Image (spheres, grey):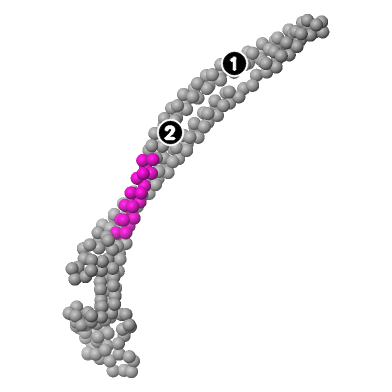
Amino acid sequence: MGKKEETDSKKALDIVLRHQADVAEAEERVAYLQGVVEQQQGIIADAKSYVTNVPELMAKRENLLADFVLGHGNQDAIDTLDKEIAAAREELSKHTTRATSVTADAKQTIAGLKRKLEATREDLSELQSQTPSVIDSFLMIEAERLGAEYVDAALVTAEKHRQLLAMDALIVKHNNHERSKSIRGLYNMELHLPLFRLNCHRRHDNPNRREDQLYRAKETQLYDEVRTAAVDQERERITNLGVNL
C-alpha cells in the first residue's frame, strides 16, 4: 500500500470523526435548549398556580353579615375577618404583580430561546444531511486503501503461483521417484485474481485480460511464453543454489 492511500485514509477518518462529533454536539445543544425552554415554561406554570383564599373569605363575610342582620352575629367577628381579607388581597396583589413580571420575562426568554433552538436545529439538519456523503467518502477512501493492499498481496500470490507452475514443470521433467510426477491439482492452473472498480486498480488494466482481472492463468496458457520464461527463471534460481538440473 502506498503512503498516499494511507494518508488519505487517515484524513478521511479524521473528517468522519470530526463530523460525528459536530453532529453529537449539535444534538446536545438542541436537547439543552429544549430543556431550558421547558424550564421557562415551568416558571410560567408555577406563576399561574397560585391559589388565593379571598373567594372563600368573602363567602364567609357574606354569612357573617347575614347573621349580623338577623341578630346572630357581632361586629368584632366581621372586623377580624375584614383584616384577614385585606391581608389575603394584599398577598394576592403582590403575587399577581410578581407573576405578571415573571411570566412576561419567561415568555420573552422562551421567544429568544426558540429562535436559538430553531437555528441550532437547522445547523443539525444541515450536518445530518451531509452524513451520507461524509460516510460514503470515507468508505470509498478506505476501499482504495484496502484495494492497494489487495493488489500488493495479489501480485505476490500471482508471482508465487507462476513460480509453482514453473517448479511443477521442472519436477515433471526431472522426476525419478515413485510419487506421481506433477504437484498440480485439478484446478491449480486456473487462478483468477479480480480487479475492483477502484482508482488504484485502473493502472493495472491490461488489454490482454478482461478489465476486471488482475491475474489470470488457465490450462490453455500452460506452455505460453510467460510460463516458459518462468520455468527458465526457476531453473536458473535452482542452478544458482548449486543443484545440477
Q: Secondary structure at mark 2?
A: helix
Q: Secondary structure at mark 1?
A: helix
Q: Is residue 71 magenta?
A: no
* Residue linked to disc 1: 94
Q: Is 64 on the left or on the right of 8, as rendered? A: right
Q: Is residue 206 above or below residue 55?
A: below
Give the crowd class for mark 2: few <14, some 14-19, many >=20 residues within 10 Å. Answer: many
In the picture, which quadrant includes the N terminus?
Answer: bottom left
- Residue 189 image-quadrant placement: bottom left
Q: Is residue 152 visible?
A: no
Residue type beneath disc 2: Leu
In the picture, which quadrant includes the C terminus?
Answer: bottom left
The CA span between labels 2 and 1 is 34 Å
**Which stretch is magenta?**
125-145
* Residue linked to disc 2: 117
Q: Residue at x 63, y 16 (%)?
A: 91
